[in-house]
Image: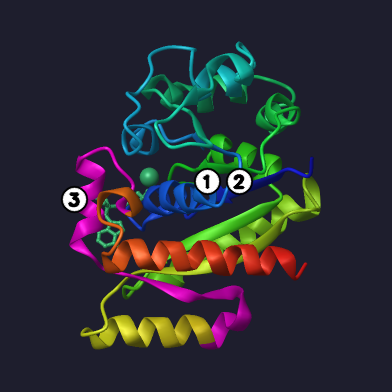
């Protein structure tokens, strides 16, 4: 089975990483793909956003990352057919320090999950450039970068691409950017349009054509522990994420 591991990453918080991970995962599961979400954010929003309570201790992505438990033993099924989760715990915030003391600190995650069998593993990354994210970038073969359409969006992107480049030239030469995803787009807002145009002129085809609009149903859905695709499938947010899944799979076919 060819496994794709996708890191959903941006060092900024609140840009739509978790929302993208759970909704893309749900849309892919709906077309019969076998999906795992690996929640690597100590906040655990991907877990709770799928109705899975945050874990405690090592029975979680924390235990997997530190090599204390086997991922197979901590995978939980969600109520969505084909979609499983390894949930996170606040203990993960200590993992950075604990990993730092180990020799193969960049490769822990890669080694731990390489034997899993899924069509796609989506890693919901925490903000920042710490060791958890370096592990995610090393384990992944693809990256999706959600980018909020706001004034400082482009500023952080250079730094992110530098990090990706340095991971590629040292520990993971197979890493590619699947796409940059414009999120929280407000078409009535000229700044939103300007940022979107800017990003497209800089990054061209690397930017998904699908744009995720700012849509209140998305934020409502997360408070009900549901992906927006299940909460309100006709909302603009749900339709956009379904479209993203279609575009994403189209890109996969063209490889
Ligand atoms: N397109 C959107 N429209 C409206 N609210 C959104 C949208 N995308 C995300 N949100 C909300 O914004 C907040 C941050 O999104 P989240 O996906 O958790 O970002 P991150 O994982 O990057 O920190 C959440 O409350 C989420 O429900
Ligand atoms: Mg998040």
Q: Looking at the image, do the residues carrying marks 1 and 3 touch, with CB atoms under 8 Å apart?
A: no
What is the x, y in percent for residue 130?
53, 39
For disc 3, the neighbor class at 10 Å (few under 14, some 14 to 19, many from 20) is some
The image quadrant of residue 79 is top left
Q: Is residue 40 above or below residue 210?
A: above
Q: How much space separates mark 2 and mark 3, taking CA atoms?
A: 26 Å
Sequence-first disc among 1 and 3: 1
Q: Is residue 36 left or right of residue 166?
A: left
Q: For mark 1, give the secondary structure.
A: helix
Q: How much space separates mark 1 and mark 3, taking CA atoms?
A: 22 Å
Magenta part of the chain: 201-228
Sequence-first disc among 2 and 3: 2
Which label was assigned to residue 103? none
Asked if the beta carbon under badge 3 is closer than 8 A to the nearest atom of ligand 1, the reply is: no
Q: Quickly name the residue at label 1.
A: 29
What is the x, y in percent for residue 26?
45, 47
């Amino acid at each position: 089975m060819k496994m794709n591991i996708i890191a959903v990453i941006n060092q900024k918080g609140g840009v739509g990483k978790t929302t993208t991970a759970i909704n893309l995962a749900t849309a892919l599961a709906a077309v019969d793909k076998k999906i795992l979400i690996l929640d690597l954010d100590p906040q655990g929003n991907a877990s709770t956003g799928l109705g899975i309570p945050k874990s405690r201790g090592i029975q979680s992505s924390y235990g997997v990352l530190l090599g204390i438990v086997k991922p197979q033993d901590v995978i939980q099924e969600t109520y969505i057919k084909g979609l499983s989760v390894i949930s996170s715990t606040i203990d993960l915030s200590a993992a950075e320090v604990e990993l730092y003391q180990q020799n193969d600190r960049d490769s822990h995650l890669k080694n731990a999950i390489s034997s899993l069998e899924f069509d796609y593993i989506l890693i919901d990354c925490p903000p920042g450039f710490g060791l958890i994210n370096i592990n995610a970038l090393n384990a992944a073969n693809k990256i999706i970068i959600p980018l909020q359409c706001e004034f400082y969006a482009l500023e952080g992107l250079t730094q992110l691409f530098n990090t990706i480049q340095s991971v590629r030239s040292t520990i993971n030469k197979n890493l590619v950017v699947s796409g940059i995803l414009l999120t929280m787009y407000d078409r009535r807002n000229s700044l939103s349009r300007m940022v979107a145009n800017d990003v497209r002129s800089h990054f061209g085809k690397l930017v998904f054509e699908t744009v995720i609009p700012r849509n209140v149903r998305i934020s409502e859905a997360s408070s009900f522990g549901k992906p927006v695709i299940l909460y309100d499938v006709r909302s603009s947010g749900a339709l956009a994420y379904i479209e993203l899944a279609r575009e994403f799979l189209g890109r996969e076919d063209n490889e």
